[in-house]
Amino acid sequence: MMQNTVLTCLADYEAAARLRLPADIWAYLNAGAADGLSQQANGQAAERLTLWPRVLRSTAGSDASVMLWGERHASPVLIGPTAYHRLAHPEGELASVMAAAALQAGMVVSTLSSLPLESIATRAQCPLWFQLYLQRRRDITLDLVRRAEAAGYRALMVTVDAPIQGARNAEQRAGFRLPAGVEAANLVDYPAAPGGDHLAAGQSVFALPGVQAAPTWEDLAWLSGQTCLPVIVKGILHPLDVQPALDAGAAGVVVSNHGGRVLDTVPATLDALPLVVEAVAGRVPVLVDGGIRRGTDILKALALGAQAVLIGRPVLHGLAVGGASGVAHVLHLLRAELEMAMVLAGLRTLEEVRSGSVLAPGRLPPAASPAATAGAASETAA
């Protein structure tokens, strides 16, 4: 930990990490696409929602654990997939997975992890999922899947919202390049895809190899047929994408705008979440990421219908400041804040949170209006 620095919340970790990291690495890890409007909107969406607490309701003996795909997690907070943890700390993903184990939190390992997925799994004492970018060659995609299965990963999280990289202007201005010793460790043994995605002067984006070979729902259906692991689709914002995802074999969806890093001016994830939850209609679990910085943010996401949340940048901030201890403290802060918010709002279970009645009037999805929840609330009053 940094000496003489009091770290009381995730904002403190962000400020401390910014002081420790080189400017170009900070820009890569933290900047959003283009003007960063969607990145800002993620946090602002939570700020617009207000809580509506109940009082004199005992929460003694409650817990905030959640069951996801047959495994219980101590809280609905998981480490989401982010690339290149060694940019933030020399131990990289090994430190992150140690922290996840200490807090009994699940972790999603990125295709672009800076250490091999197998070496991360050897240090895991928590449920691991593998985040997968569908590769241009199906044999490479399938080999990544088989490696994840053999290493004991419990689910695949397929990112579908980034067939090409967005306009990351802040990263470009900072002149970011991967430093020596940091690489996409899971991909080094595979042949590079022919023809990079660098846009030459006068060239159309539509002609880029990544666009020409971009995956489709057909590819997701093929993948679902190749594995017995649950396939979770990450990057859903539009409710009309829910049914195609389920038809292609999705066992869950993640409402995500890639942390605002791909396409700018898309909806904040908490704004899109209720519409996706409505379209899913309880058929599969719904998770959400983007701008989660407080326990009250988690409470609001659950009230809007999410089963759990994923955190990305805060993990890297914790790594930069304190390695495994920093990440563990970030996870602890979020869990403690969530449980504190549940006590102060008079909520005994996550099921009560998901009733929607914790959100103030005027901010509720139709199914959780005050009139609709009044009867249910009186039935469960202490």
Image: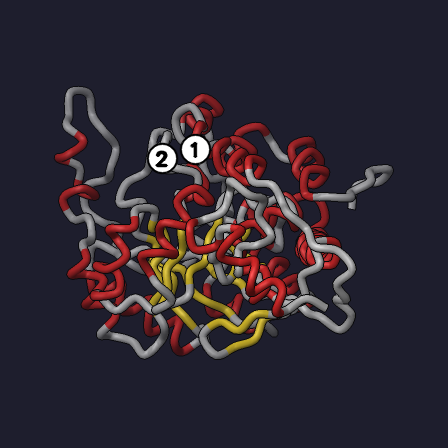
Residue 345 quadrant? bottom right
* Residue at the spot 14% in from the left edge and 28% down from the top edge: 204
Residue 209 percent coordinates (x, y):
17, 42
Residue 244 percent coordinates (x, y):
21, 59
Which residue was labeled with disc 2? 266
Q: Residue furthest right?
A: 4
Can residue 252 be seen at all in this image of the molecule? yes
Residue 292 percent coordinates (x, y):
57, 46
* Residue at the spot 52% in from the left edge and 31% down from the top edge: 27
Q: Is disc 1 in contact with disc 2, using a CB cutoff of under 8 Å?
A: yes
> Judging from the image, what secondary structure is the residue with disc 1 in?
helix
Up the image or down, 245 lies above or below 297; here it is below
Which residue was labeled with disc 1? 38
Q: Residues within 10 Å of mark 2 (few under 14, many from 20)?
A: some
Give whichever of discs 1 and 2 has the lower sequence position: 1
Residue 20 quadrant? top right
User: What is the three-letter code of the residue carrying label 2?
Assistant: Val
> Judging from the image, what secondary structure is the residue with disc 2 in?
loop
Q: Nearer the viewer, residue 20 or 274?
A: 274
The color scheme shown is: secondary structure
Up the image or down, 169 lies above or below 337; here it is above
Residue 162 percent coordinates (x, y):
31, 45
Q: Residues within 10 Å of mark 1 (few under 14, many from 20)?
A: many
User: What is the three-letter code of the residue carrying label 1?
Assistant: Ser
